[in-house]
Amino acid sequence: MDPSQLKYAETHEWVFVDGDVATVGITSHAVEQLTDLVYMYLPAVGSQVSAGSPFGEVESVKATSDLYSPIDGEVMEVNSTLPDNLDLLNSDPYGKGWIMKVKLSSTDAVGKLMDQAAYEKQCADHG
Amino acid sequence: MTSTEPIPSAEPVLATALKDWHQSRNGRMVDFAGWLMPVQYSSIIEEHTATREAVGIFDVSHMGRFYFDGPEIDRFLDSLTTRRVAGVEQGKIRYSLMTNERGTILDDVLVYHLARPNGKSQYMMVVNAGNRRKIYEWIMQHIPGRGITLDDQTLESAMIAVQGPMACDIIDNISAQNPKELPYYTGAYSTVCGYEAIVSRTGYTGEDGCEIIVSKTAAEEVASEIADRSASVGGRPVGLGARDTLRLEAAMPLYGHELTEGINASQTDLNFAINLKDRDFVGRAAIVAAKKRTDLPVRVGLELDGRRAAREECTLHVVDKQVGFVTSGTFAPTLQKAISMGYVLPEYSALGTPIIVNIRGKTAQAVVVKLPFYSRY
């Protein structure tokens, strides 16, 4: 996926919206900051996610971090190969490292997300 | 993402003599116990592995360094330490706890009895960074009116730990004192790169190695010399992240986690550091009383199924009953397992006891295992 076409949350998740389906992952900046990933907890297919609430967690050697949903909807599919291949988050965070696909129940939250330029500015300003 | 890392301290941030050195090597700096310290330079796993297989270089200048002067210092210190430090011969270093009247833990410390170049004794104590002021005040409160003085040299000096199977060889090349001639847990005044130094065969990683104390002005040159020489054998600077995973695999307790003012020394399974016979110290009576109790949780090691780590504040359960709590945990890079230390009620502390861990609302299976998790022997 082309990072310039994605939307970004302050909490370092990216979203690709295609009609009423959103694909969600975490940014390369997030992966760089986390380092040494060892584990990822994915949501169940069919579960509801809501913007700003945790939907899973990623664990590095150092700490456990919540993953926050940038959007509202129902989980249609998860990248079940990812927990055993966390290197995909390093090698292809915007492609093979996708985390979940969500059927949007509303597009309200999508409008509040940042574009790439705004997200990169946030990373530069706050690290 | 929001991380569940420890809350940074609110105190003003102090910097060690190596702050610029860390930053020039891409150290990711964080506030730790009021000090700006590198948590990692690259990858925690790479830094961890370099220490196990070659050499890791750690800035431990944030640890408090107290120097004592005056008569009968060993007898005075002995009145505040759970371990006997009076009458210990020159050169030796003793790991001990310091406890309050309740027998709960104020700090874990190293007491050095060094021979100065003129042969006279120098007593010194290394305390945890986060407890430096507290222990300074505690000692001053108890210091007898017989001329003992305490000099906090933390801000005037630097301390560098060099750890790993090749650490002593690296230091042998730049030190007048060959560290391999120092038995484990001894130290000596010497020179390193021509600078006055204290070299000791000590560390906090479970590996062989040594620690060097030099003046603040010598710190960068000494650290660079060690780093350059270590690089050729796969060694590298190591941050606090890997320091934590290394000490956890070696089951070494960390103040604020396994050791707190809420835990009695008798609960810690550190019996080698608690000498109760024929001596008295602050907290002794309370430790003796606590030893007789059967309702106080004791420190254990846990190995978990899966890669998910149980960290501080996870709770431990057997069937529906909470039987303990986790004090620290991680995915262990050398062992490739999730490990934790924690406290459980004595009846659940036997090796092999199955325990359920509640990790942020989800459960995982664990079993009580022998400590340490990792031993280099």
Image (tube, rainbow, N blue to C red):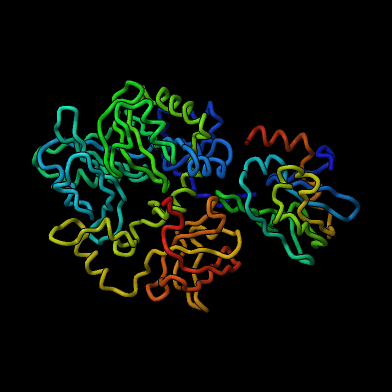
Instruction: Where is residue B329? Give x, y as percent.
Output: 50, 57
Q: Nearer the viewer, residue B201 or B321?
A: B201
Which residue sits at x=32%, y=20%?
B194
Which residue sits at x=77%, y=43%?
A92
Left or right, residue B17 beside residue A72: left
Up the image or down, B53 lies above or below A57; here it is above
Which residue sits at x=14%, y=47%?
B87
Instruction: Where is residue B346? Give x, y as percent.
Output: 37, 73
Up the image or down, B239 lies above or below A80; here it is above
Q: Nearer the viewer, residue B173 or A14?
A: B173
Left or right, residue B119 beside residue B185: left
Instruction: Where is residue A108? Give x, y as percent.
Output: 81, 52
Q: Looking at this view, name the residue that lies furthest to the right.
A: A19
Q: Nearer the viewer, residue A56 or B266?
A: B266
Residue B152: quarter of image: top left
Left or right, residue B324 beside residue B187: right
Residue B121 visible in image: yes
Q: Looking at this view, name the residue that lies furthest to the bottom.
A: B319
Q: Looking at this view, name the residue that lies furthest to the left.
A: B146
Which residue sits at x=84%, y=58%?
A104
Residue B215 visible in image: no
Instruction: Where is residue B330? Give x, y as percent.
Output: 53, 54
